[in-house]
């Protein structure tokens, strides 16, 4: 089995409910989407990075693992593009008694279901229409897949949280509609968090916009948090 990796490095987790934890990031190459705020555009091409045998990739993970690492984060690109490789690397990480974390747009619920047994922490990211995630024709299908992934993760009793990136372009009505869809299929008690993440350095939302987004989620999930990307604020990779 082969895998294309863009980079492997240790840093502090800069996003979500586990921000601040010492993390080994395994960035896989390839993503089929074009979110305008993506901060790793160089990893999006399917032929970016370098190709490795899966055994060599696992050796690379072991070589880069540092003492007291809290978790290994499979990110991208989008790791679901290379699901089988993620599974094998996750098995290797578990053999080292370290938790695994999946960072994906969850665009394919069948691929997600396949990798889910090998993941300990799950972030389900739902994209707003303004993200340039995909054309409007296919947007609803991809959101349905992400919502299905959310249901599957909760059913599997994985620690699961939702993340939505917002920008100055994010329409409040659209955000509200997406939030309603989430809680139509989700019991708030089953979520470990709901993160509203503002874009950084491009189309940044105002404080008032962030408060408005917060107010939409709060009636459903009072532990909602607005969390910027920590790693960018401290200059970490």
Image (cartoon, rainbow, N blue to C red):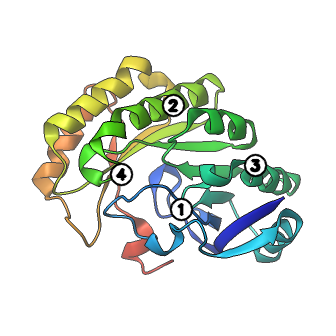
Which badge, 4 or 2, comes first in the chain's sequence? 4
Q: In this view, does 70 lie to the left or right of 60?
A: left
Alpha carbons under labels 2 and 1: distance apart: 20 Å
Distance from Cα at disc 1 to Cα at disc 4: 13 Å
Which of labels 2 and 3 is toward the front? 3
Residue density around tag 1, few if under 14, some if 14–19, many if 20 or more, within 10 Å: many
Residue 15 in view? yes
Work out whether residue 15 or residue 50 is closer to the camera in this orientation and state it.
50
**Vertical arrangement, residue 42 with respect to residue 36, above or below:** below
Q: Residue 77 carries which label?
A: 1
Secondary-structure class at tag 4 = loop
Q: Which of marks 2 and 1 is nearer the N terminus?
A: 1
Position of residue 152 measured from the top left corner of the image (x, y, whole percent): 59, 26
Q: Residues within 10 Å of mark 2 (few under 14, many from 20)?
A: many
Question: Where is residue 232 shown, x and y percent of the image?
Answer: 40, 74
Question: N-terminal of the two: label 2 or label 3?
Answer: 3
Q: Distance between the residues labelled 3 and 1?
A: 15 Å
**x, y percent for residue 106:** 52, 42
Q: What's the residue at 43%, 37% (across, down)? A: 142
User: Which class describes the residues within 10 Å of circle 3: few (<14), some (14-19), or many (20+)?
Assistant: some
For the residues marked 4 and 3, what is the alpha-carbon distance in whole angstroms? 24 Å
Circle 2 SS class: helix
Residue at x-position 64% and y-position 39%: 111
């Amino acid at each position: 089995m082969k895998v294309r990796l863009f980079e492997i490095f240790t840093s502090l987790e800069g996003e979500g409910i586990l921000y601040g934890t010492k993390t080994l990031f395994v960035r896989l190459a390839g993503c089929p989407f074009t979110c305008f705020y993506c901060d790793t555009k160089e990893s999006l091409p399917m032929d970016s990075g370098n190709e490795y045998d899966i055994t060599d990739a696992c050796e690379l993970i072991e070589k880069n693992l540092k003492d007291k690492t809290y978790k290994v984060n499979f990110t991208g690109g989008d790791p679901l593009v290379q699901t089988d490789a993620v599974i094998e690397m996750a098995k290797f990480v578990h053999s080292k008694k370290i938790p695994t974390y999946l960072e994906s747009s969850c665009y394919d619920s069948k691929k997600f279901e396949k990798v889910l047994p090998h993941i300990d922490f799950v972030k389900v990211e739902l994209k707003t229409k303004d993200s340039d995630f995909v054309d409007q024709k296919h947007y609803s299908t991809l959101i349905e897949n992400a919502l299905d992934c959310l249901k599957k993760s909760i059913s599997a009793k994985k620690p699961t949280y939702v993340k939505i990136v917002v920008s100055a372009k994010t329409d409040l009505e659209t955000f509200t509609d997406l939030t309603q869809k989430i809680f139509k299929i989700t019991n708030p008690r089953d979520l470990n968090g709901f993160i509203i993440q503002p874009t950084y350095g491009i189309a940044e939302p105002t404080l008032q916009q962030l408060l408005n987004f917060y107010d939409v989620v709060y009636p459903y999930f009072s532990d909602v948090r607005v969390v910027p990307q920590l790693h960018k604020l401290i200059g970490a990779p």
